[in-house]
Image (spheres, helix red, strand yellow):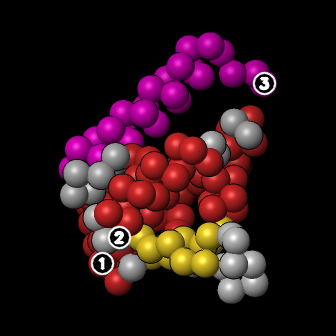
Amino acid sequence: MAETPDEITRLKIVLARISRFVDKQVSGDGLTRTQLSVLGSVARLGPLGVGALADTEGMNPTMLSRVIGKLEGDGLLARTADPDDRRAVRVQVTDAGAELHRRLRSERTQLFADALDRLPERDADALRTVLPALEALAREIAMLSR
């Protein structure tokens, strides 16, 4: 069964609305969505080469370099020489960056947990059931943006 344009629009709108509401509730200490995403990727994946990070984030290296510079200036990321290739740069999270990432992740998790607890059980169960499909959708969209 094919989705109707209305269903696709509703899905797009509700996902964007959830994202905006979460961003509004858990501000990220003044960081942009892009900066938070880069910080989160480095915190989760460990020290990364700039090229690998650009691929992960779907960003061009020039823009990524600006984002890294901002996060480095804020003391959240650090650039180091790659131990295998001194010409290459690796990015790693600082203690302050790791702490901010943990705090924001915890606050966002609690926000979702509280909202799910207030939903009727059938709606919460439906969300758990559809989670693999939403993850697959996210992967497909990520592939299209590369």
Quadrant that contains the C terminus: top right
- Where is mark 2, residue-wise? 76
- Where is mark 1, residue-wise? 96
Residue 33 as seen in the image, left or right of residue 103:
right
Q: Please tell me the numbered disc located at residue 106.
A: none
Residue 111 x %, y %: 28, 59
As rendered, which of 76 and 82 lies closer to the eye? 82
Give the extent of the magenta segment: 1-25
* Callout 2 touching callout 1 (CB < 8 Å): yes
Q: Residue at x 35, y 83 (%)?
A: 95
N-terminal label among 1 and 3: 3
N-terminal label among 3 and 2: 3
Query: Residue reaching furthest front?
Result: 87
User: Magenta includes 22?
Assistant: yes
Residue 123 as seen in the image, left or right of residue 48:
left
- Where is mark 3, residue-wise? 1
Q: CA distance from mark 1 to mark 3?
A: 49 Å
User: Element under label 2?
Assistant: loop
As rendered, which of 56 and 26 lies closer to the eye? 56
